[in-house]
Each structure stands twice: as C-alpha cells, then as structure tokens.
Amino acid sequence: MKLVTVLILTALPLYCYAGIGCNIMDDVISMTIDPDVNVTEYINNMQEFLPGEETEKAFTFMKECFLHQSEETLENVKVLQQAIYSSFWCARY
C-alpha cells in the first residue's frame, strides 16, 4: 500500500510540470484519502476516469486500501501531497 501511495504521489510533479491536471489530481487524491467517501460514491465520482472494468477494479482496490489506513497515515499522505505541491516542479502552477 505504501508503495502504491508513493508511486501515485511521485507522479504529481510530472502532471504539474506539464501544466495540466493539477486541480483534477488534487480532487482525485482528496477523494481517495477521504475516509468519509465510501467506495460506491468514489467510483461514481471517478466514472470519467474509468475507461474499463479493469481500471474500475484498480480504483476500487486503491480506495479500499485507503479506507483501511489509520488517521495518522492519512494525515501523513496529506502532508506528503502538500510537500509535492510546494516543490520546485509544481510551484509554477
């Protein structure tokens, strides 16, 4: 789970560097780590990013992983997210 989180969050500067998708990525990550959003609601909100059943299964698995994390871990993910957004690569966007 931690590897998946690190891989997702390390991709953020690339999106920001390209100048597209930062707001969308922020919304997706916020919904992913929000413990108040259940899997069904999450999948319904992510439909535009789900081209097929396999992708939907991956999103479902990822959301379920975050739902099983402690509040401390979720707060640490938010801190990491902000550190990435404040990085040199995303600062311009």
Image (tube, grey):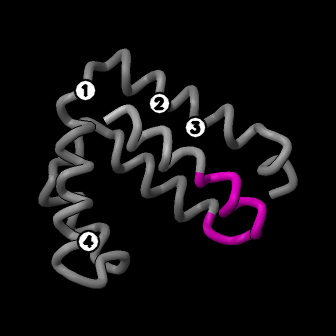
Q: CA distance from mark 4 to mark 3?
A: 23 Å
**x then y, percent, for residue 30:** 43, 46
Q: Residue at label 1?
A: 69
Q: Residue at label 2?
A: 77
Q: Nearer the viewer, residue 51 or 74?
A: 51
Q: Residue at label 3?
A: 81
Q: CA distance from mark 4 to mark 1?
A: 22 Å
- Residue type (three-letter) at the residue carrying disc 3: Gln
User: Where, by quadrant of the figure, is residue 66 drawn?
Assistant: top left
Q: Earlier in the sequence, mark 4 or mark 1?
A: 4
Secondary element under disc 1, as helix, strand or loop, is: loop
- Residue type (three-letter) at the residue carrying disc 4: Thr
Image quadrant holding the N terminus, namely top left
Q: Nearer the viewer, residue 93 or 69?
A: 69
Residue 74, relative to residue 49: is it above or below? above
Q: Residue at x 29, y 67 (%)?
A: 45
**x then y, percent, for residue 60:** 18, 57
Name, please, the residue furthest toward the front: 3
Residue 56, relative to residue 37: is it above or below? below
- Residue type (three-letter) at the residue carrying disc 1: Gln
Marks 1 and 4: in contact by CB < 8 Å? no
